[in-house]
Image (tube, grey):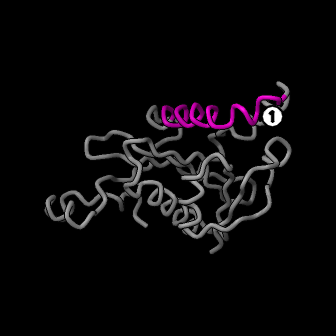
Amino acid sequence: MDVEAGRVAGTVPEAYARRVNLPDFRIEKVDVDDPRAVALREALDADLDERYRDADADDTPEVAAKRGEALAVHPEQVVATLLALDADDTPLGHVILRRLGEEWELKRLIVVAAGRRRGIGTALTATVVDLARSGGAHRVILQSGRMQPESLRVYAAAGFTPIPVYEPYLETMPRSLCFEYVF
């Protein structure tokens, strides 16, 4: 898949694109430390903290630190960082494809409120799957949780199926919901 496949501007008249509901965004590969990508990951962290605050309230500082390490983005593991951008370059979504040992993992998917219900999560997920496939992966795995129902719907619709919780999440997030997409 072309990484910029989400972009249709210039290929058909704008009025027609609106009438047939063609994507009004593009997907762009960026550096993991691109300020827009960093800002979206910070927004995701704040959102997840809010969603899981009560569930994690009794965790010791040691468990919280281990969980933070399990969730950390290590640039040397990142295969691709993707942003969904609208016509004026406003970031609408973000996802990472990383190598986790021998595995290929979809990580840190977020779609901001202004981008929701436009197919951005679906497009970012499909692009990660295609990049992994073209890189030689046999499957793509991901970790999520029960407090993220909108993400779970995207993954199910994309063809991901449940798998047991895997490392590095098993110790600090044993109730995670994990999935795979097998090629």
Q: Is residue 137 magenta?
A: no
**Camera-nearest residue between 170 and 6:** 170
x%, y% of residue 69? Answer: 75, 35
Identify whether 102 is placed above or below 89.
below
Residue sitting at 65 percent across and 72 percent down?
182
Secondary element type, mark 1: helix
**Camera-nearest residue between 37 and 175:** 175
x%, y% of residue 107? Answer: 61, 49
Amino acid under label 1?
A: Lys
Residue under label 1, please give it.
66
Q: Which residue in the rendered view is the most extreme toward the bottom?
A: 183
Crowd band around label 1 with a 10 angstrom C-alpha radius: few (<14), some (14–19), many (20+)? some
- Could you tell me how many numbered marks the image carries? 1
- Is 28 positioned to the left or the right of 53 in the image? left
**Residues in magenta, as a range:** 38-59
Residue sitting at 49 percent across and 36 percent down?
40
**Camera-nearest residue between 144 and 128:** 144
In the rendered image, the quadrant that contains the C terminus is bottom right
- Is 69 positioned to the left or the right of 80 in the image? right
What main secondary structure does the magenta stretch of the protein show?
Answer: helix
Picture quarter containing residue 70? top right
Identify whether 129 is placed above or below 43.
below
Picture quarter containing residue 104? bottom right
Residue sitting at 66 percent across and 56 percent down?
142
